[in-house]
Amino acid sequence: MYPLPICTVRAVDSTQLIERCDRLAALAGRRLAFPAANPAAEARARQLRDHLDGFVRPRVADIDAPLLVLLLGPTGAGKSSLLNTIAGAEVSKAGVLRPTTKDAVLYASEKDADRILAGGRLAAIGRDRLKLAAAPAGADGVAVIDAPDIDSVERDNRELADVLVETSDLCVFVTTATRYADLVPWEVLGRVRERGLPLVVILNRVPNDDEDREAIVADATRLFEEKPVDLIVIDEGDLDPRVNGLQRDKARPLLDRIALLSAEADERRAVATQALAGALRGLTPLAHSIADDLEHEAIDADALQRIAASTYAEELASLNRALQGGLLLREEVLRRWNEFVGADQVARFISTGIGRLRAMLLTVFRPAAAAPVTVVEAEMTSTLEALALRHATEAARRTAMAWSDRSQAAELVAGNPALWSASKGFGPAIREGLSAWMRTIVDDVRSHAGRKRAVAQIAALGVNAVAVAVMLGVFAYTAGLTGAEVGIAAGTAFLNQKLLEAIFGEGAMGELIANARSRLGELLTSLFEQERARFDALVPSPQGLRELAADLRAAVAGMAS
Ligand SMILES: Nc1nc2c(ncn2[C@@H]2O[C@H](COP(=O)(O)OP(=O)(O)OP(=O)(O)O)[C@@H](O)[C@H]2O)c(=O)[nH]1
Ligand SMILES: [Mg+2]
């Protein structure tokens, strides 16, 4: 085995580096607060956090802390057997059942174990998933971790191994003659390389036959070749039953290396420095990948919010069109209103001119009945409420339908049945909004009553009745209205308009109606916006995602790569 190259990190300003790592760790935490679009994106974010917390920050803070050597590899490759060999005793159960090792085993002297645990490097691992195996004091400086496998059906094992990859200084990858080209271990090795972790490969259980042995070693060397690695070959049957481990002689190059590291602080520092340099190099591409993830998620979030926005806008526009279509009152209610305003007389006086109508309102007008203000108002409110509810429900249904066609949103919609219709609060909110709206019309009429021209007429009819007339005008007032429209609704609208004209004059009437109409428009717009906000709230803010991506890129800008 070649000695590991001694490489020094460019003189780094450690205070600056610590600050930068703190900033990155905070950003990784912010990223993890957003739901990731897919498991790979989630894993990248966790990697960054675990890597910073478990390795970079503690290593920068203390380059002389004990080295962590990680035994990693597929199940049954002989990791635990190798640890027993290193320890010279059976400290980790090695066995025939797959997988055997369920929890990580930390083999370290008492002093080192205390220092490692106090330093927080293994904080991401639940204390219940970490077993301690005591090494003699002579082994100070180097701690070895036997990891659970990376490829069995036990998902938890893989997660634990992944966290350990982020925290170690040196990786001893244990594989076998039959497993060295397997896909999953290969992917894990990819991360080990990305992260710049010094690597030693143990090829175990190699056939004794010289020809086979040579062919396998050549093939494995070719596969690992992209980056030179230290390769240690151990034959099938090279076992040491006394410790339930591999034969000591065969593992000698690794044992010697560990002994040297344990004896020489400079050697340890060289490995730690190399691991740190690799780690810092790996931070930049990792941070950029996470920023890419965030930007993709922002595009998805934008698309979802756009679907909701355009659907709600369409339904609101179609509601507004329906409201302009004429009086939406039942015939019997229209009749009561006509009866009150004395439709017959009004109609008669219209033909003789608006001036006569004005005079008539003062002299002839004797209401035949009490103003049916409450009835008309209640009818108008319930009709409007039903109509608005229908469109709000349609907007919700259409948005939910469109979202469920998109993989990342389908789950959100599926888990939220209330999204398929208008919210529970919509009915009460619109009732309350409409009654406040009516009050503003009454206030408007009252302030007009203060003007000379309209005062007498308003007094004759009553403020509330005139306000109801204005409200009716909102739904049926058009500049081109003539008496020719058929039906009682059109007829009522026509009379109503003439009545208002007689009271206020054309200009003031138009202004009153336009104000009331625009306030109604604002009310409906804001209620629809609140409804749509239920959808918007389910996706992260695209702007927030983009800002975080930019912050991440800025945090690694100019960093060694
Ligand atoms: N016959 C034979 N058995 C071996 C050889 N090398 C390892 N084994 C056995 O293979 C089994 C696997 O060893 P372990 O050390 O438990 O493997 P591991 O990598 O720790 O596996 P997990 O803990 O499941 O991830 C043990 O029973 C070893 O005794 C060998 O060269 N020959
Ligand atoms: Mg094991």
Image: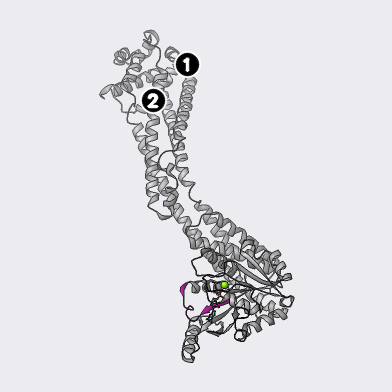
Q: Position of residue 400 (x, y in %)?
A: 40, 46
Q: Is disc 2 placed on a helix, strand or loop?
A: helix
Q: Is residue 434 above or below residue 266?
A: above
- Extreme bottom residue here? 210
Query: Is the C terminus in the top left, top right, bottom left or bottom right quadrant?
Result: bottom right
Which is more toward the observer, 385 or 360?
Answer: 385
Q: Is residue 232 above or below residue 394?
A: below
Q: Amino acid at mark 2?
A: Met
Q: Which residue is mark 2?
A: 380
Mark 1 or mark 2, which is nearer the start of the sequence? 2
Q: Judge depth for marks 2 and 1 and give the one in front.
A: 2
Q: Are marks 2 and 1 in contact (CB under 8 Å)?
A: no
Q: Position of residue 397 (x, y in %)?
A: 38, 43
Asked if the stretch drawn in magenta spans residue 285, the answer is no
- Please, which colouring scheme is shown? one colour
Horizontal placement of 72 versus 17: left or right?
Answer: left
Q: From which residue to which does the magenta span run?
A: 172-183
Residue sitting at x 42%, y 30%: 517
Which is more toward the observer, 401 or 101?
Answer: 101
Q: Quadrant of residue 64?
A: bottom right
Horizontal placement of 559 versus 62: left or right?
Answer: left
Q: Is residue 373 visible?
A: yes
Indicate which quadrant contains ligand 2.
Answer: bottom right
Q: Amino acid at mark 1?
A: Lys
Residue sitting at x 73%, y 70%: 110
